[in-house]
Image (cartoon, grey):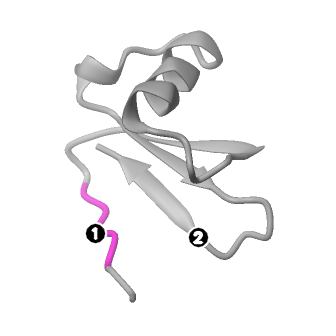
Amino acid sequence: MSSLLQLGTHRCYHLYRKETDMRKGFNQLCGIITNEPGRQVTQGDAFIFINRPRTQILPII
C-alpha cells in the first residue's frame, strides 16, 4: 500500500527524528508531540513520525 503525502505552504511541518513505534495509537503520538517538542496538536501544524528501519512514515495532521 502506498500513499501520497502532499506538503503545502499553509502549515508548519515538524519531523520527529527519533524512531517511533508505529503501533502507538493517536493519543500516544499526540502525547509525544505535546511532551517532547512542547507543541500543541491543535495549532494546525503537521507532525511526521518515522519507524526504526525508516521504511514507514506516519503524518499527524
In three-dimensional space, the C-alpha distance between marks 1 and 2, rounded to whole angstroms, equals: 16 Å
The quadrant holding residue 25 is top left
- Pick whichever, 48 or 30, lies toward us: 30
- Pick whichever, 28 or 33, lies toward us: 28
Residue holding disc 2: 56
The quadrant holding residue 37 is top right
Indicate the amino acid at tag 1: Gln
Q: Residues within 10 Å of mark 1 (few under 14, many from 20)?
A: few
The picture places residue 60, in percent across and down from the top left corner, at 36, 44
Q: Earlier in the sequence, mark 1 or mark 2?
A: 1
Point out which mark residue 6 bears.
Answer: 1
- Predominant secondary structure in magenta? loop
Tag 2 secondary structure: loop
Q: Quarter holding the N terminus?
A: bottom left
Which residue range is magenta in the image? 4-8
The picture places residue 7, in percent across and down from the top left corner, at 31, 62
Q: Do the residues labelled 1 and 2 touch (CB within 8 Å)?
A: no
